[in-house]
Amino acid sequence: MSDTLVGFDEVLTRYEPVIGLETHVELGTASKMFCGCSTTFGAEPNTQTCPVCLGLPGSLPVANAAAIESTIRIGLALGCRIATWCRFSRKNYFYPDIPKGFQTTQYDEPLCTAGHLDVEVDGETYRVEIERVHLEEDTGKNLHVGGATGRIHGADHSLIDYNRAGIPLVEIVTRPIPGAGAKAPEVARAYVTELREILLALGVSEVRMEQGNLRSDVNTSLAPIGSLEWGTRTETKNVNSLRSVERAVRFEMRRQAAVLDAGERVLQETRHFHEDTGTTSPGRSKEEATDYRYFPEPDLVPVAPDEEWVAKLAAMLPELPAARRARLSEEWGISPTEMAWLVNAGAVELVSDTVAAGASPADARKWWLGELARRANDAGVDLAELAVTPAQVAELVGLVAAGTINDQLARQALDGVLAGEGDPAAIVESRGLAVMGESDELVGAVEAAIEGNPDVAEKVRGGKVQAIGALVGAVMKTTRGKADAATVKRMLEERLL
Amino acid sequence: MTTTPENEVRASTDVTSMTVTELQAALQDGATSAEITQAYLDRIAADDDVLGSYLHVDPAAAVERAAAIDAAGSAGSGLAGIPVALKDVIVTAGVPTTSGSKILEGWKPPYDATVAARLGAAGTVLLGKTNMDEFAMGSSTENSAYRITRNPWDPERIPGGSSGGSSAAVAGGLAPWAIGTDTGGSIRQPAALTGLVGHKPTYGSVSRFGLIAFSSSLDQAGPMARTVLDAALLHEAIGGHDPLDSTSIDAPVPVLAEAARRGAGGDLTGLKVGIVRELGGEGHTDGYEPGVLARVAEAVALLESMGAEVREVSCPAFDLALPAYYLIAPSEASSNLSRFDGVRYGLRVGDDGSRDLDEVMALTRERGFGAEVKRRIILGTYALSSGYYDAYYGQAQKVRTLISRDFSAAYDEVDVVVSPTTPTVAFPLGSRVDDPVAMYAADLCTLPASLAGVPAISVPCGLSDGLPVGFQIMAPALADDRCYRVAAALESAQDDARGSRFLDQLPHRDAQAAGGAA
């Protein structure tokens, strides 16, 4: 199966994309949505279950108040209206990973509605309207054994792990986002990135995408430029990394453009994203979609958040990422674009912590975006995963500022930190990295350089002062970088001028 | 608490004919729970092949449990040592629970329903699990996937349903009392047809945790007993708030036995009673047997003689209760029964490697569910379908609101409203199985209280053609005590007039008792 694709830039000469995102977030509550079972990730299959989350006959749900509170806080952070009264509903369908034969969710009465989230791409702000934020329960996890694809078709048998069944899940649905044009893939990514930052700031979820804490379904459609109607959309399921969000939109735009160019119809369908190839393939067709027969869940009482309580939650929201970035930009004296680099590098927290540990903002930024970014890139890990703490970076910066080491020695000290040898000061000591003072050794090295390079020395004496650099280099070489270049230069000048 | 038999009419000497208050006294006088339990087990062994009231009995476990209560010295204190039967819709840890369905054959639950746990904590002894219409869907217990249950008053007649196993066991001397569940009348109707007291509590006042759900917004567990006082004692033991049931009302356990004792004093001065015109009153007598209406009229006269003020009240929306109920209950059931898919427990059909998941689920449900259950699943699935929801489920919910308003308006004028419990006495086995609508009509009088969530009791009010007639007393939500008070007044006045307990009129009762006590 290979799709015909149109070049991305060419797509935009004829079509206007509209995107939309449905994002599922597993809340970090200690217990599940409707029972007391633990939500810890990675336990032995089916060990975190009870009659309620297994849907055993006779069992009844009791809503998790902490999950309701988290959902309301998410809604408040997104500027949503919070319902004064709403209900859970049953979404009925048969599948082994939903133990009750229905999923308890919210249908026409979501907890939060009508919010928005502003995201920035290349200095331009896009307002993403939030249609709803609602609360539901996660499903169990199927493991299809045998067969090539890990899909149910062709499998020898299937195993089900209900540890995940009943974990509270918040679904955040945007309204369609038109007008992003060529930036549509990046707007989609920026939205999920910003949403993730907010969820982290709220502390409601670990939002580890690789553990499935945050899963996005990406809707994409194309319409001919100037068309008054939007095109038919596809829904690409379970796009599980920020990069994939962008790639999925990009691929769907290119694929749909080819379909439309051929005079065919885009099918309204669910598609799967493939991380390895960056492509999508058709899943369940919406044309055979089940009727979910939603109705209000009679086993739960309506949720009626007290207005005063909601106001208190609003007042207690933490500083949100956008406001925090604006404040830090000002404090650090950097431009929004420079701040955007820090955000994209995932370095805002690291820089902030490094500043808090005593480094100047400029030094902290220089280290995290420079040397440390290079190391992370070489190692293929995120900045935050490097084995160096902001406090250690601040210590390095301090050692340089005090003249104890220079930049080159600091890089060697960093090698030691990353190798687990301890804190920078200790490594400077143990590796003997401290800058040489005006010791006999250095005097000897300086004099040796002058004696060994009489031509150069003569040029300097003759007024060609810039030639002194060659002598400095020679001294640095003999001292293996431990000398301070400025000191060496001064010592040479004292002897030659 | 010193317990004395409240009904002094004629204390029985056979433990299987005793009321629970008499059993408590016997235990305090030195009888053992093991003896009492064994007497019931003997009766079950002797009679239940014919009566068909139980689905599961474990005599050894029952005797062992009774002996443990005896050994602990707690028998006779409260309910300790008293045997009890549970309808098989109630989940019991380690004890087979089928809800009358083949689809749950062999399932042993890993947990106890709150009702079962509370009775266990009170020291009762589980005699067994009683037969019922499959998933509580029916009015005759003929929809059980396992067996027919007969009415002790006439073995060719039905014991009512869906709690027909419980009603037959208690009336027939095979259990001193039992728990039933009532969704549209499944406690009250079988109680009425077998001469028992049966009470459907205010919705939310008895935990539903561990009741295999039929219709979640209607299901309530409640007591079925030989006297009003016994029913009140059993209700008190299972009632009260349960954090495991979100719809459970956070209110103190109601004081009901005291209300029953007070009612038995026979003074109803100042009590205002409303007779519901739409339930057998003028212009609404179609389908009601004259004998039933006559007994109900006599009961009303008796209430009046005890000082009650009686008037007629009109509740026009009650006429719509039956169609509304048969949309709401099947709709919820269609969803509640979705979990029976053969994947995790119970029956699985066709999993031979040649069929895919959908086929195995379909075959399991095809084979595992009976005709009435399938009928209601299809009805409910249709009523909830997109495009039909508003016209059916939505409309039925509006009717439900209207019925509640009719009740509220009536309670503005009167303290309780009364009606026959059923339009007819127990009908012959097999006479309605092929006519679902005729079967559904058996719940005509009990449906309004179910839909409004208000408490309602059925208490015997005489015989028609030698078969029991039930009198229904309905009260406002959380005023269950009024039901018990008025029912006890009626029971006591009738017993006095008759000179015997109602169940003493049961044919061959003495012969049975003699056999059982031998």
Image (cartoon, rainbow, N blue to C red):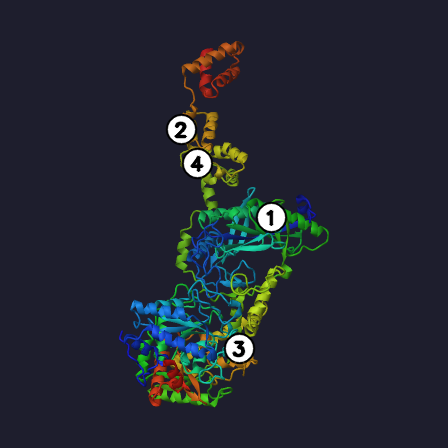
Circle number at residue A180:
1
- Few, some or many C-alpha atoms within 10 Å of disc 3 (few <14, some 14-19, many ≥20)? few
The residue lying furthest to the front in this view is B518
Instruction: Report the Cα–Cα distance between label 3 and label 1.
Output: 53 Å
Of the image marks 4 and 1, the number of the one nearer the N terminus: 1
The residue type indicated by label 4 comes to: Pro
The chain letter under disc 3 is B
Q: Nearer the viewer, mark 1 or mark 2?
A: 2
Q: Are marks 3 and 2 on the same chain?
A: no
Instruction: Report the Cα–Cα distance between label 3 and label 2.
Output: 84 Å
- Few, some or many C-alpha atoms within 10 Å of disc 1 (few <14, some 14-19, many ≥20)? some
Which residue is the site of mark 3?
B323
In the image, residue B179 sits, relative to residue A119, either above or below, namely: below
Q: Position of residue B455 (x, y in %)?
A: 40, 76
Q: Is residue B504 left or right of residue A321?
A: left
Q: Nearer the viewer, mark 3 or mark 1?
A: 3
Which residue is the site of mark 4?
A390
- Few, some or many C-alpha atoms within 10 Å of disc 4 (few <14, some 14-19, many ≥20)? many
The residue lying furthest to the left in this view is B2
Determine the secondary structure under disc 3: helix
Instruction: Report the Cα–Cα distance between label 3 and label 4.
Output: 70 Å
The chain letter under disc 2 is A
Quarter of the figure with the N terminus of chain B: bottom left
Contact between marks 3 and 1 (CB within 8 A): the answer is no
Determine the secondary structure under disc 1: loop
Contact between marks 3 and 2 (CB within 8 A): the answer is no
Q: Is residue A189 left or right of residue B468?
A: right
Q: Position of residue A374 (x, y in %)?
A: 53, 33
Q: Is residue B292 left or right of residue A265?
A: left
